[in-house]
Structure formats: structure tokens, C-alpha cells
Amino acid sequence: MTDRLVERFCAMVRIDSESGNEARFIDAMKGRFEEELSATCAVDAHGNLIAKVPAKGAVDVAPIFLAAHADTVKPGVGIEPIVEDGVIRSKGETILGADDKAGLAAIVEAVLTAQTRPPVEIVVTRGEEIGLVGARNLDLSLLDAERGIIADSEALNEVILGGPTHASLDVEIVGKAAHAAAPEHGVSAIRVAAQAICRFEEGNLDDETVSNVGTIHGGMIRNGVPERVTIEAECRSLDHDKCLRQAEAMRAAFEAAASDAGATTNVEVRIEYEASKTSEDSSIVRLAKEAISAAGLEPETRVILGGTDALILSGRGLETAVIGVGGEAAHSTDERIRVADLEKVAEILRHLLEIAAAE
Ligand SMILES: [Zn+2]
């Protein structure tokens, strides 16, 4: 199984699929799934792939979906995987794409090797890395499964139950331009930004809430009072209301600082997704934990402050949990994954299908 799995994984990462350019990868997977898994495939209007694989050795068992995302971050063009000492890495100029093709390769391997399985719906989403847009637009009418697993986290023994509400803030501050030699005629937008940012808390606010100012752009020339600044900030909390309160505190800080200085500001707050948590007692979480145990690991559950497609799918009514795929240094050119981990994920998913088939 190892060679076939590693080969499949390497073949997947060799097909470029940076966010927004997944079509060729989706099309290739459609072809492979039809051929290798006898799957019935559909690509929805957004370009997500749904591949239905019939049950094996199981009758009257509810279908289950197994999902991974097609897209990678940049630099993800021309990935050349290298297998060395049991570790797969890129040549160094690109990411590897184990996030999330390790998940997808393991899913296919599990479907192929499971002795028994319920009907499986492999869901390959687009645009996960740029705001979970594929999951948002996934055509659920093409799915029969009401519960499923996303293979897209790190630790192999962990089941991720849920995540935060995430608010994005786009801020514009407009002061008044003036020559640096006559600053009394100007209002510095940079100074307003600095004062505003110092008025709200940043970093870890408590054990479930964080906030961050990620970018700041402003000013045109050294010897001019800067008229305009734009800022991208965000906050997240596992507690929905805390996230909203923090976003409002940030907005209020920008508005107060601008008003005090005689500048104007426009703050747009956007809720990217809302906190959700799949119950420890849900059948999908129990299934995931049993599968991890069956593969010889000690299962643990937790919630994370990152976003996954699970937040969107849970919000849309599907019972969803996330499992790890191993892999290290995702989103960097050092990204790598151990062959043993890739095999372990496939093993966990194989157990999961066999246990589900016997339910
Ligand atoms: Zn991912």
C-alpha cells in the first residue's frame, strides 16, 4: 500500500492548484475517482467535486462524507515532491501541498482498502485557504450524507470538534494632508491609527479570544503629513458574543481616535464564519475516536481558533468533525510529511469506514 499511497500523493501535489486555480486538479481527480473507485462524480456550480462511491459489504447503512480541500497556498506552482528517509518534502522553492492533498490521498487509499464501507461521498472543496469559499458554496443537494469527516488538521490522534467566530475589520482613516514643514495644517492618519490601535487589546485576550492587526498601509512621502491609512485587522473567539464585543471595541477605538484628532474613519466589520462545535456525544465524533483507537493511538478532542471547512458545513447542518493528517510546517516551503503519518491517516480512515459499515 505504501508505494501506491506515496505515488498517489506525489501525483496529486504535482498538479498545481493554488486557491482560485483548482479546476485542472478537480478535473484530474474526477477522472481518477471514476476510474479507480468507480465513483459517480459531480462538479457543482462553484467547481467543488462530489464523488459518490457505492457501499461495500454493507446494506442499509447511512452514507458518510469524507472531505479535503483542493486548493493550496502560494508558492504552489510546479511542486516537485522528494521522498527521502521516509519524509516527503518539496524541492524547496514551493510548498509541498500536504495541506490538504495528504488528506485526499489518504481518503482514496482508505476507500480502496476498506474491507467493508458505507456509501462514501468524497467531497473536494475549492478555496478553503481564501475564506472557506468552496464549502460556503458547496451544493448540498448533491450530497446524501448528513455526517462526515474532514481530513485537514495536524495531530493524528486529535478530533477537532469546532472553532471560533471570526470577524474581519477593514479600516480606512482619512486625515488631512499637509507639508511636513507646516504640520499644523494637517491631520496625520498614521498617528490616528497608532492611537486607535493602542486603545484596544491585542494578542491573547483570554483563553478563547484573540485579536490581531495584520496590515497597515498609509502615507505617500516622507515629507508630508499622511492623509490616508488602511488597516486590516481581525478577531476570533470560541465564544461568538465575545468576538462581536471585541470587534465592536476595535471599531469604537478607531472611531474615537479619529474623532479626537479631527479625522474621519470608516470601519467595516465582516463575520467570516460563526463559532460551532460538534458534540462529543455525536455519532461522528464517537466514530472518529473509535477509528483513532483502532489505529493504535489515544484519541483526544479539542477546539481550535483556526477556521476549517467544518465550521461552514456544521453551520449548514452537517455533523462534521476534523481529523489530522500529520504534516509539518504547512504554508511554508519547509512543509513536509512523514510517509508513516500518511499511512496512519489512511489506516484511521479505513477503520472509520469499516466501523461505520458495521453500525
Ligand atoms: Zn488545510
Image (tube, rainbow, N blue to C red):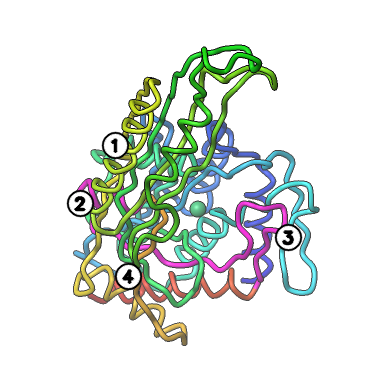
**Label 1 – label 3 distance at C-alpha:** 46 Å
In this rendering, the answer to whether 181 lies above or below 256 is above
- The front one of 136 and 354 is 136
- Of badges 4 and 1, the one in the foreground is 1
Give the distance between the C-alpha atoms of the residues marked 2 and 3, in whole angstroms. Answer: 41 Å
Classify residue 210 by image quadrant: bottom left
Who comes first in sequence, dot 4 or dot 1?
4
As drawn, the label of residue 252 is: 1
- Identify residue for label 3: 89
> Is the distance from the Cβ of mark 4 to the nearest ligand 1 atom less than 8 Å?
no
Residue contact at pointers 1 and 3, CB within 8 angstroms: no
Q: Which residues are magenta?
A: 310-339
- Labels 4 and 2: the sequence-earlier one: 4
Q: Is residue 355 magenta?
A: no
Label 1 SS:
helix
Marks 2, 3: nearer the viewer:
2
Calculate the distance from the C-alpha at mark 4 to the C-alpha at mark 2: 47 Å
Point out residue 182 in the picture as x, y percentages from the top left corner. 60, 14
Amino acid beneath label 3: Arg
Tell me the amino acid under the disc marked 4.
Gly
* Left or right: residue 250 compared with residue 185: left
- Tell us which disc is closer to us: 4 or 2: 2
Q: Residues within 10 Å of mark 1 (few under 14, many from 20)?
A: some
Q: Residue 96 appears at what percent x and percent y?
A: 68, 53
Q: CA distance from mark 4 to mark 3?
A: 37 Å
Amino acid identity at mark 1: Ala
Q: Which residue is mark 2?
A: 241
- Who comes first in sequence, dot 2 or dot 1? 2
